[in-house]
Image (tube, rainbow, N blue to C red):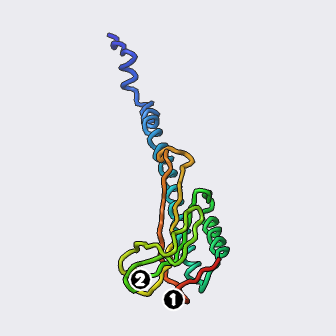
Amino acid sequence: MAAPRKTLFARLRDDPRGVSAVEFALLAPVMIAFYFGLAEFCQGYMAQKRMGHVAAVIADLVSQSDAVTSSQVTDMFRVGDMVMKPFSATPLKQRVSSLTRNSSGVVKVDWSQGAGMTPRSTGSTVTIPTGLIANGESVIMTEATYDYDSPVDYLMPAITRFSQTYYLRPRTVDQVAYSN
C-alpha cells in the first residue's frame, strides 16, 4: 500500500531547510533599523559634547587673560568654531560675559560679547547658581547653543537644540577687563 501524498503546504511545513532564511528575513530589518538609529544617536551625542566643549574652551581662554579686546574674543569664537569640526559651525551660537556680584548680592553684567547671540546688556542682572561667587567676586560665563539637524532624519527628523552654560573664575586677576 502506497503512502498518501502530502499536499504542498504540508510538505513546506515539514521541510526545515528554509527556517534560517525566514528567520533572517524577519530579523534583518529590525537589526538594520537599530544600527542606523544607534549611528544617528551617536552623531547627535557627539555634536552635543563638542558644543559643550566649545563653552568650556571659550571660558578657559577668557579666564586665563588679564584683559581681552573685542577682536581677541572674536578670535576665541573662531576657536570654538574649529572645535565643532567635523560638524558645521554655522548653527553654533556663542556668548561670553563677565559677571560680578555686588555688595547687595546682585549679579550684574560687566561686559558681554556674542557670536550669533545678542550680547547681554552691561549692568543687567543675571541669575547664576547659588554659592558660585561671593559678594565682590567675578566670574566668566559662556553660553553656547547648537541647532543639530541629523543628516539621516531617521530618529530625529526635527532640529534639536543643544545648549550649555559654563562658569569659570578669572585666574590671574579679580576681574577680566574688556576693551573695544
Q: Which of the 4 image quarters holds residue 53?
A: bottom right
Identify the element where label 2 is drawn.
loop
Q: Residue at x 48, y 80 (%)?
A: 139
Quadrant containing the C terminus is: bottom right
Q: Which of the 4 image quarters holds residue 23?
A: top left
Marks 1 and 2, how far apart at CA = 12 Å
For label 2, the crowd category at 10 Å Cα-Cα, with few meaning under 14, some 14 to 19 and many 20 or more, is some
Tell me the residue that label 1 is attached to: 174
Placement of 31 over or under 180, stated as above or below: above
Q: Residue at x 56, y 66 (%)?
A: 94
**Amino acid type for the residue under numbered disc 2:** Ile
Q: Is residue 112 left or right of residue 29?
A: right
User: Mark 2 and mark 1 in contact (Cβ < 8 Å)?
Assistant: no
**Residue 165 spot, x, y in % from top left:** 47, 69
| Mark toward the start of the polypeptide (1 vs 2) | 2
**Residue 178 spot, x, y in % from top left:** 60, 80
Q: Which label sits on residue 133?
A: 2
For label 1, the crowd category at 10 Å Cα-Cα, with few meaning under 14, some 14 to 19 and many 20 or more, is some
Identify the element where label 1 is drawn.
loop
**Residue 84 spot, x, y in % from top left:** 60, 63
Question: For this rendering, which residue is in front, 141 or 150?
Answer: 141
**Residue 76 spot, x, y in % from top left:** 63, 72
Placement of 116 over or under 131, stated as above or below: above
Placement of 41 over or under 27, stated as above or below: below
Q: Which of the 4 image quarters holds residue 105?
A: bottom left
Q: Which label sits on residue 155?
A: none
**Amino acid type for the residue under numbered disc 1:** Asp
